[in-house]
Image (cartoon, rainbow, N blue to C red):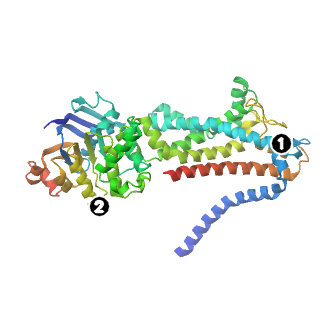
Amino acid sequence: MIPERIKERFGFGVLLVATLVVVIPVLFIIWLIISKGWSALSWNFLFTMPRQGMREGGIFPAIVGTLYLVIVSIAFALPIGVMAAIYLSEYAKDNVLTRTINLAIVNLAGVSSVVYGLFGLSLFVVFLKFGVSIISGALTLGIMTLPVIITTTREALRAVPKSYREVSFSLGATRWQTIRHSVLPSAIPGILTGAILSIGRVAGETAPILFTVAAFYLPRLPHSPLDQAMALPYHLYIVSTQIPNVPENYRYGTAFVLVGLVLIMNISAVIIRSRFRRRK
Amino acid sequence: MKARFEIRDLAVAYGKVQGLKALTLDIYENEILSIIGPSNSGKTSFLRTLNRLNDLEPQARTTGTVKLDGRDIFKDMSAESLRQRVGMIFALPIPLPLSIYDNVAYGPRMSGLRNKEEIGALVESSLRAAYLWDEVKDRLRSSGQKLSGGQQQRLCIARTLALEPGVILFDEPCSGLDPISTAKVEESMTELKKDHTIVLVTNNTKQAARVGTRTAFFLMGDMVEIGPTEAIFTAPENPRTEDYIVGRFG
């Protein structure tokens, strides 16, 4: 007979190992990027154009391109996703149509990102004639991230106690007033969580921008939303595989900037979220 | 006595479950009608029909007529305008996640009041009428959810009063409160009776005896008996009423 105390210790041990298995790769990635990329960071690297076939100079246009893509795609996807989620969870009746829509949203979340890239190419670039441009890429990324925003927003709305709605109705509020003044304020932190998840995904995806916006080499800033742009993940792919003899710290420095950029945007969103939580 | 609510053959079903069967009843001006009965007796269904909160249940089917001051509440007015006239206090105090001030101002603002001075005056008079003003007048901007349980329930009463409703429905308003807070809520009910009609659903038969003008006993969707509170508690006509009051079941 094994004593219960030993069994318990063994059980906790297994759980601890599982947790470490999750944490170790993350720490390793961060260590790798920092140790190999840190030396590349400089004012020149961050704020000048690439030179010498991207073996020298900076990655400024790629940073700006990724920022544009994140801002435009979130500005497009967040309002539409939130509105769709409000409709689905607060207005739509539970029938075959809404269940089909919900199923479609769940499945959209599972479609691989290169398929979104092809979709963006045929719809925005070719059919709507936006060309290979920031607007095409941002819309493609926005559509890719819609399911995430809709799902998290819906969960946030569902987490608002039913009693808030009843109280609001009992005070003579209409359904829209109830959503606007009693439900949404409590759901905003959850909605922002969805936005945070989306920012990371939009900034980091390569496949959706491959055919829709990304320029191989464009040593200037984009002039308009209809212009092409460089972007960090695609740039990283190019300097790692397409161009020989790129210094190692240049490649890891690009990765470092991408991860750091996402981190900064996430932290700002987390700060905004905590301000909403405190206001209650 | 003038009838405010005229209820004729009111029945409420949830799917196949009959919540309330053919109820006919008048509710008069300036009375407190206490409704007692065990759970599943239909008393809460009845209350939530009077302000059409039952409309929110997709399963609920209502038949019969309910008139408020002579107008059919289902046909002659919108649910919103009905609820502005028929306020409701819930079993658990639920302040919205807003300041004390904004909680009280919620109803008037939703019905379109914009004038800041009017809203301010309404907030003060409502908080005074709910015996809460002196305790919160210095912190109207702090969260309503930070008040104690008894204060929260009085905040909810103030919030309802700000709509200046003619009728107030109380759904077991003291079930989560201590005896002192309960006494304060009962005191305000008695005070409100002067210019409101009050319907009180309660599991506490003693509370019904203390504050009710009339008392009705509900059992399994039927109204077994209704009469002046004294008569119900001293000489009920129906033996089932007596059994419930003395605690033989329920």
Residues packed near mark 1 inside 10 Å, few (<14), some (14 to 19) or many (20 plus): some
Residues packed near mark 2 inside 10 Å, few (<14), some (14 to 19) or many (20 plus): few
- Specify whether B79 is left or right of A42: left
Instruction: Pinpoint the chain carrying mark 1.
Output: A
Horizontal and vertical percent position of residue B71 = 24, 29
- Image point (72%, 48%), residue name: A261
- Specify whether B217 is left or right of A12: left
- Specify whether A144 is left or right of A253: left
Horizontal and vertical percent position of residue A262 = 70, 48
Q: Is residue A48 above or below residue A35?
A: above
Res. A238 mark = 1
- Image point (52%, 38%), residue name: A85
Horizontal and vertical percent position of residue A140 = 68, 34
Relative depth, front residue between A6 and A280: A280
Q: Which residue is mark 2?
A: B178
Quarter-of-image position of residue A202: top right
Quarter of the image with the N terminus of chain B in it: top left
- Image point (22%, 49%), residue name: B191
- Distance in Å between CA atoms under marks 1 and 2: 71 Å
Relative depth, front residue between A79 and B28: B28
- Image point (49%, 31%), residue name: A97
Tell me the amino acid under the disc marked 2: Asp
Relative depth, front residue between B235 and B31: B31
Which label sits in the foreground, 1 or 2? 2
At numbered mark 1, what does the secondary structure look like: helix, strand or loop?
helix
